[in-house]
Image: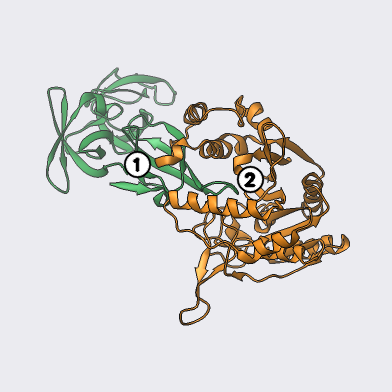
């Protein structure tokens, strides 16, 4: 399906040079000479880069078949991550390469946001914060509770995050998935 | 905003009164037009029954030139103009146009008068004049009068301009316009009032074309505050040339899939009778108000936006 330049608005998904983009800004200009033009700023949904493009008013642009769905993480099968669509109960397999920035925080049953383009997953976004159990870290030294010393800790999902010295194995900590940093301790090991 | 707008309207009237330029208010409804390939008029049917539809004028050019031919002397008009399909941060289908004509003054002199009006309305201290060719060479390294369509297309694509669909891709003026809007206009200093003059002969509208080599249209535009504020010419005086340009514009309209427009027969008759040597300019008054108020949309400087 095609859009016309007059359909341009923020949030519209279009396909340019075979890749999906979302329009961030759109402006119509009509010079005193010649036909009108539309200038847009758009973000490439795969490469996450923003570009400027100018179109002649009235030209047609391909619509991008982009769909966003909430899905739940089921399990990992070999090098593929399997998710279940919360609305259709369909299963989607996503290769490791598309899981950058998300793989290391996944717990079974976790709800994530997935963007599909032409039916395939292009981005997976975990929740902003996740609570993970510390699988291994150096024991905290007695009497060290007041200092700012950080130490590396391995989480149940496999990622390594720096945590304060007082954290012990079995503690549940809150992690910010966008920065990969420790937020706070949720509960102590029982 | 209303007060500021009223002030500017008043200042404009005083500016012209002081210079002996007469205010006129010509009809907005007309049976014929100055035909342009890219300006679409709003048509309406003011009389019931089978009477021919009228157009709401996109500019008062035609009736004002008829007054000039009848010996009016220098005249100005501050009134509404209408254009179909134009809505955006700087566009409204109904807007206010300030247009005036100076018999006996060349277009360079008129540029200076526009500059003086900007000084009176916006406090603009000075202005620059650059040729169309000059800005292309300075900013893009290309001579717009001699570059091939392929060269222009390559330059444009390298700057994020998508190839226009259909036959437009073969028209060098399409590429020049896209390059001008994408690479040249945004690169000009918005704090400096810049007149761009001497356009390619193919973009002359109703401007006279010089006898130089290559011939250029004696046409100018004012770019200020990141906006195109005006369009002015050394006016075309030959009736046959008018007929030819209207016909060419209609042909281009057909190629673009648009309807033909009725040329203004009374304008042509007036030109045949004799238009004095003159230059004329049309300014988007609302955009001047935008600059005065620091507004970033035309919707913020009119009482009610469409």
The hue in which chain B appears in the rendered picture of the protein: orange
In terms of image quadrants, where is residue A101?
top left
Give the labeled residue for mark 1.
A14
Residue furthest bottom as drawn? B48
> Which chain wears green?
A
Vertical arrangement, residue B40 with respect to residue B229, above or below: below
- Percent across and percent down for residue B125 are 82, 44
- Percent across and percent down for residue A121 are 23, 34
Residue A146 got which mark? none
Q: Is residue A154 left or right of residue B260?
A: left
Q: Which mark is in front, 1 or 2?
A: 2
Category of crowding for the residue at label 1, using alpha-carbon neighbours closer than 10 angstroms: few (below 14), some (14–19), many (at least 20)? many
Q: Nearer the viewer, residue A23 or A182?
A: A23
Q: Nearer the viewer, residue B170 or A7?
A: B170
Total labels drawn: 2
Q: Nearer the viewer, residue A124 or B83?
A: B83
Give the labeled residue for mark 2.
B204
């Amino acid at each position: 399906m095609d859009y016309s330049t007059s359909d341009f608005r923020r949030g519209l998904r279009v396909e340019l040079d075979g890749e999906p983009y979302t329009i961030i800004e759109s402006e119509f200009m009509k010079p005193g000479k010649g036909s009108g033009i539309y200038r847009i700023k758009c973000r490439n949904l795969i490469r996450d880069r923003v570009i400027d493009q100018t179109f002649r008013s009235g030209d047609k642009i391909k619509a991008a078949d982009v769909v966003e769905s909430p899905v739940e993480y089921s399990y990992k099968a070999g090098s593929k991550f399997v998710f279940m669509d919360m609305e259709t109960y369909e299963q989607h397999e996503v290769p490791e390469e598309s899981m950058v920035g998300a793989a290391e925080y996944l717990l079974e049953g976790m709800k994530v946001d997935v963007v599909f383009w032409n039916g395939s997953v292009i981005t997976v976004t975990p929740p902003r914060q996740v609570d993970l159990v510390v699988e291994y870290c150096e024991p905290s030294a007695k009497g060290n509770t007041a200092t700012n010393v950080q130490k590396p800790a391995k989480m149940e999902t496999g990622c390594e995050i720096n945590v304060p010295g007082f954290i012990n194995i079995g503690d549940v900590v809150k992690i910010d998935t966008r920065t990969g940093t420790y937020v706070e301790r949720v509960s102590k090991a029982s | 905003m209303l007060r500021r707008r009223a002030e500017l309207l008043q200042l404009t009237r005083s500016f012209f009164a002081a210079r002996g330029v007469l205010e006129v208010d010509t009809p907005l409804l007309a049976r014929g037009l100055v035909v342009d390939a890219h300006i679409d008029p709003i048509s309406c049917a003011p009389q019931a029954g089978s009477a021919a539809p009228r157009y709401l004028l996109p500019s008062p050019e035609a009736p004002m030139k008829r007054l000039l031919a009848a010996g009016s002397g220098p005249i100005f008009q501050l009134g509404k103009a209408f254009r179909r399909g134009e809505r955006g941060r700087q566009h409204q289908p109904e807007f206010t146009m300030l247009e005036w004509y100076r018999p006996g003054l060349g277009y360079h002199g008129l540029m200076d008068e526009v500059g003086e009006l900007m000084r009176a309305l916006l406090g603009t201290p000075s202005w620059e004049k650059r040729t169309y060719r000059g800005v292309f060479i300075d900013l893009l390294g290309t001579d717009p009068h001699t570059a091939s369509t392929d060269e222009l297309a390559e330059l444009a694509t390298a700057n994020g301009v998508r190839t226009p669909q259909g036959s437009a891709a073969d028209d060098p003026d399409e590429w020049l316009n896209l390059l001008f809007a994408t690479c040249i206009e945004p690169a000009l200093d918005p704090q400096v009032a810049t007149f761009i003059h001497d356009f390619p002969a193919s973009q002359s509208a109703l401007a006279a074309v010089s006898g130089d080599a290559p011939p250029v249209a004696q046409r100018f535009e004012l770019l200020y505050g990141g906006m195109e504020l005006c369009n002015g010419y050394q006016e075309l005086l030959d009736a046959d040339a008018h007929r030819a340009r209207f016909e060419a514009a209609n042909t281009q309209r057909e190629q673009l899939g648009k309807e033909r427009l009725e040329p203004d027969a009374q304008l042509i008759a007036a030109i045949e009778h004799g238009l004095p040597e003159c230059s004329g300019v049309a300014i988007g008054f609302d955009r001047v108000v935008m600059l005065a108020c620091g507004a970033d949309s035309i919707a913020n400087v009119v009482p009610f936006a469409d």
